[in-house]
Amino acid sequence: MRFTVVNEFKESVSTYMTKKALITGITGQDGSFLAEFLIEKGYEVHGILRRSSSFNTNRIEHLYLDEWVRDMKQERLVNLHYGDMTDSSSLVRIIQQIQPDEIYNLAAQSHVKVSFDVPEYTADTDALGTLRLLEAVRILGLEKKTRIYQASTSELFGKVQEIPQTETTPFYPRSPYGVAKQYGYWITKNYRESYEMFAVNGILFNHESERRGETFVTRKITLAAARIAQGHQEKLYLGNLSALRDWGYARDYVECMWLMLQHDTPEDFVIATGEAHSVREFATLAFDAVGIPLRWEGEGLQEKGICTQTGKVLVEVDPKYFRPAEVEQLLGDPSKAKKVLGWNPRQTSFEELVRLMVQSDMEGVKRHYEKGKRYDG
Ligand code: NDP
Ligand code: GDR
């Protein structure tokens, strides 16, 4: 028999007492922070892992141990299940097995520029994937038990119709990603209204961290600043320097996802800081944090970031990073989340966010080059 009597008791108590959460996209930036947050809250946490030819669990390795270690230690860790948002059968199987109290749908092809290259895959994963998940819950008769969080996005606002954006601002997505996420938003709302499911949209504005993917602009900048400061890179090439974003800290934002599912009624919320900064500003602060003061010269394609001490050009514009249609300005109004959920949008300031990302990359680059390896985050 696998368990002793004590463990059987523990297991039966946990069946009744412990809430179960399923996170799609657990290996991503937000999934990893949310898993930590829910474990801390005492949840039994499950996650969907997609098959990859190389390891894709580096963000959650500290939460994930081999089964034999788990059995010996009897610790609560994340439980991973192979599945994919493009595969209904895997979603039904996993949800049937877990019978989750809460599902957080964070899985997505989340890169806006890449969505122009793989529009169909983006729609399959981000739009139809959301439908598949909602249908799986309904088919299994869990619509009254399982609460669902859908990762919606400020990209829904796209070509902005008003500033700042609130829960009632009209949508105008500007990319295949934004359009797919608009389907995800509406199908979530539709299932809530049609089947009385507790399914909600968190309309989250950009949120970053030391675990942000290396091809998103903030992390690309902090990693490059760290490499340049330590002599491992010559220059950083960027696209639209004037884009304005409302950047928050991811660790602060996962709390909102949970708060939305604990609320009495299913409602949608804008989550943002209420402050916008340009890509240029982010780069200036990041280089400053590694001891390289920058000044900007020129305009458009000719704009350059120059070190004021050495006169060296460190940042240049490369049109290959421009998008076929750009979202120029996003600024969220988090008043509803503040008032209804009691969430504090200013736990980490913009300056602190840049500093903590730079510091993490400075340490990472140093560690990895000491081992003679290139550091990619
Ligand atoms: P990441 O890109 O870091 O993570 C995406 C996750 O989705 C990864 O775990 C990835 O797996 C998984 N995934 C991708 N495709 C599939 C698929 N077909 N089947 C199963 N899993 C898949 O995103 P973030 O953590 O930054 O964002 C989380 C969610 O929030 C996303 O839906 C994103 O669109 C949305 N969002 C993000 C914002 C932000 O600023 N970060 C703002 C607003 C919304 P793998 O690790 O194998 O690639
Ligand atoms: P975004 O994030 O598109 O807002 O989507 P990203 O960091 O990719 O771009 C932000 C802005 O910076 C400009 N930019 C560059 N972007 C990238 N990636 N690389 C560059 O070299 C570069 N130079 C300038 C972009 O044009 C853009 O204006 C993120 C994702 O997490 C989505 O999943 C999420 O829904 C939204 O945030 C809210």
Image (spheres, helix red, strand yellow):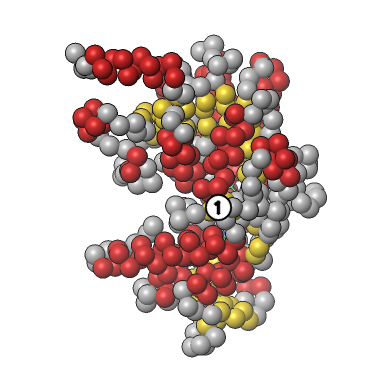
**Which residue extends farthest top?**
141
Q: In the drawing, does residue 355 fall left or right of residue 197?
A: left
**Residue 214 horizontal/vertical position (percent):** 45, 56
Classify the position of the C terminus by image quarter: bottom left
Q: In the drawing, does residue 82 fall left or right of residue 203?
A: left
Residue marked by disc 1: 249
Q: Using the rendered view, name the quadrant where residue 233 is placed.
A: bottom left
**Residue 372 horizontal/vertical position (percent):** 24, 67
* 149 relative to 113, above or below: above
**Residue 264 horizontal/vertical position (percent):** 66, 25
**Residue 320 horizontal/vertical position (percent):** 55, 63
Q: Residue at x 54, y 62 (%)?
A: 352
Q: Residue at x 52, y 27 (%)?
A: 103
Say which element carries label 1. strand
Q: Using the rendered view, name the quadrant where residue 316 is placed.
A: bottom right
For the question of whether residue 175 can be seen, the reply is no
